[in-house]
Image: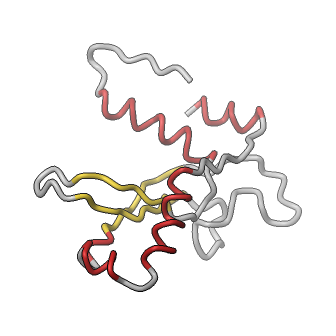
Amino acid sequence: VLFKVSDNDNLADVMAKYYTLMSPMLEMCKVRFTEYEDVFTKQNLLAACLAAYRKGDKSAAGTCEEPGSKAGNNDSSVPHLIGVACMDMQLLASSAQLQTHVGWDGYWQAVQAQMRACPVRKLTESQLQELRAE
């Protein structure tokens, strides 16, 4: 994937397009975790993030239904990312409280396995062309 960036382009916007292109290749409505260092407190934090997509069907209750997934619908469109919402686990409890909880070890193993995984969906050539055209 090539994104040309001219001197007058907003680099952040161009870089965000990369995620718009890549997000349809991930499993929809699956919480993703990311561990990072807070820039102010220098504490390690764990964020749970969920991507939001434009509804594929206006009658759908939510955005988790993939476009074209209804029976008889041959629409080959791809999910269109509209944003990502994240929440730090430390808003619920401190790191010390989380790590001393009886279920922490199993939870942390599952989170680490999920962070290492790369769940890739296969897109058709027409779906890839649709993404490239945006």
- Of 70 and 41, which appears nearest the observer? 41
Is 94 placed above or below 29 here? below
Could you say where residue 86 lies in the image, as x and y percent from the top left? 36, 63
Asked if residue 24 lies left or right of residue 112, the reply is right
Quick one: quadrant of the N terminus?
top right
- Of 130 and 104, which appears nearest the observer? 104
Could you say where residue 41 lies in the image, as x and y percent from the top left? 12, 58
Asked if residue 21 lies left or right of residue 40, the reply is right
Q: Quadrant of residue 67?
A: bottom right
Q: Quadrant of residue 91?
A: bottom left
User: In the orientation shown, which residue stands out farthest toward the top?
Assistant: 7
Quick one: quadrant of the C terminus?
top right
Residue drawn at point x = 51 percent, y = 74 percent: 106
Could you say where residue 32 lies in the image, as x and y percent from the top left? 49, 59
- Of 134 and 33, which appears nearest the observer? 33
Asked if residue 87 lies left or right of residue 25, the reply is left
Residue drawn at point x = 70 percent, y = 47 percent: 121
| Color encoding of the figure | secondary structure
User: In the orientation shown, which residue stands out farthest toward the left?
Assistant: 40
| Numbered circles on residues, count | 0
Could you say where residue 5 lies in the image, as x and y percent from the top left? 37, 18
Residue drawn at point x = 63 percent, y = 56 percent: 27
User: In the orientation shown, which residue stands out farthest toward the bottom?
Assistant: 102
User: In the orientation shown, which residue stands out farthest toward the right?
Assistant: 72
Q: Quadrant of residue 85?
A: bottom left
Residue drawn at point x = 11 percent, y = 54 percent: 40
- Of 98 and 85, which appears nearest the observer? 98
